[in-house]
């Protein structure tokens, strides 16, 4: 029983991490519009990115969200992170920013691996 409680706690910590990081990332993108312009993205894309990150983060925290929807949110987050990594590398951005995005991508991938196991285990067929 104790192991089950620990797994549930880790599950919510992983989900919380992904949601927190995406909301923080959305806030940073919204409050620093010149950073995305320096990476070559138009301003309308910044607004779209901010909106979808916030919506995705909220959707992940709802316990009644279907697993299929969560999978699409995770996929969107991974595409966003990989795109950010490619943009930072291709524009010759600071190594610190490249490392930050790389570490965050790795942590999100690890979190998704754990969270998806829990979500699939709780799915009723």
Image (cartoon, rainbow, N blue to C red):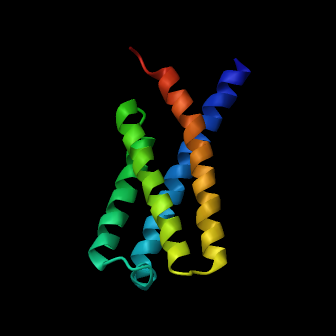
Query: Which one is nearer the viewer's eye here, 109 or 115?
Result: 109
Query: Which one is nearer the viewer's eye here, 21 or 5?
Result: 21
Q: Residue at x 31, y 71 (%)?
A: 45
Q: Kindly tell me whether residue 28 is visible in this rendering.
A: yes
Query: Which quadrant holds the C terminus?
Result: top left
Asked if 99 appears above or below 107 in the picture, the reply is below
Query: Which quadrant holds the N terminus?
Result: top right
Q: Residue at x 41, y 38 (%)?
A: 71
Q: In the image, is 122 to the left or to the right of 73?
A: right
Image spot of residue 24 (x, y percent)? 50, 64
Q: Residue at x 44, y 59 (%)?
A: 80
The quadrant in which residue 12 appears is top right
Asked if 70 appears above or below 96 in the picture, the reply is above
Image spot of residue 57 (x, y percent)? 43, 51
Q: Residue at x 31, y 78 (%)?
A: 42
Considering every residue shown, the one lying at the far top of the view is 125
Total marks placed: 0
Asked if 14 appears above or below 33 in the picture, the reply is above
Q: Kindly tell me whether residue 65 is visible in this rendering.
A: no
Query: Which one is nearer the viewer's eye here, 75 or 3?
Result: 75
Image spot of residue 19 (x, y percent)? 49, 52
Considering every residue shown, the one lying at the far right of the view is 2
Query: Which one is nearer the viewer's eye here, 28 or 99?
Result: 99
The quadrant in which residue 89 appears is bottom right
Q: In the image, is 9 to the left or to the right of 28?
A: right
Q: In the image, is 80 to the left or to the right of 7?
A: left
Considering every residue shown, the one lying at the far front of the view is 90
Asked if 39 appears above or below 80 in the picture, the reply is below
């Amino acid at each position: 029983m104790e192991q089950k409680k620990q797994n549930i706690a880790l599950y919510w910590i992983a989900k919380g991490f992904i949601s927190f990081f995406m909301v923080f990332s959305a806030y940073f993108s919204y409050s620093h519009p010149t950073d995305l312009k320096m990476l070559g993205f138009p301003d309308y894309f910044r607004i779209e990115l901010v909106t979808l990150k916030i919506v995705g983060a909220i959707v992940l925290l709802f316990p009644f969200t279907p697993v299929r929807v969560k999978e699409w949110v995770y996929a969107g987050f991974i595409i966003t992170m990989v795109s950010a990594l490619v943009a930072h590398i291709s524009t010759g951005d600071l190594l610190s920013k490249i490392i930050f995005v790389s570490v965050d991508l790795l942590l999100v991938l690890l979190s998704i691996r754990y969270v998806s196991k829990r979500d699939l285990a709780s799915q009723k067929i």
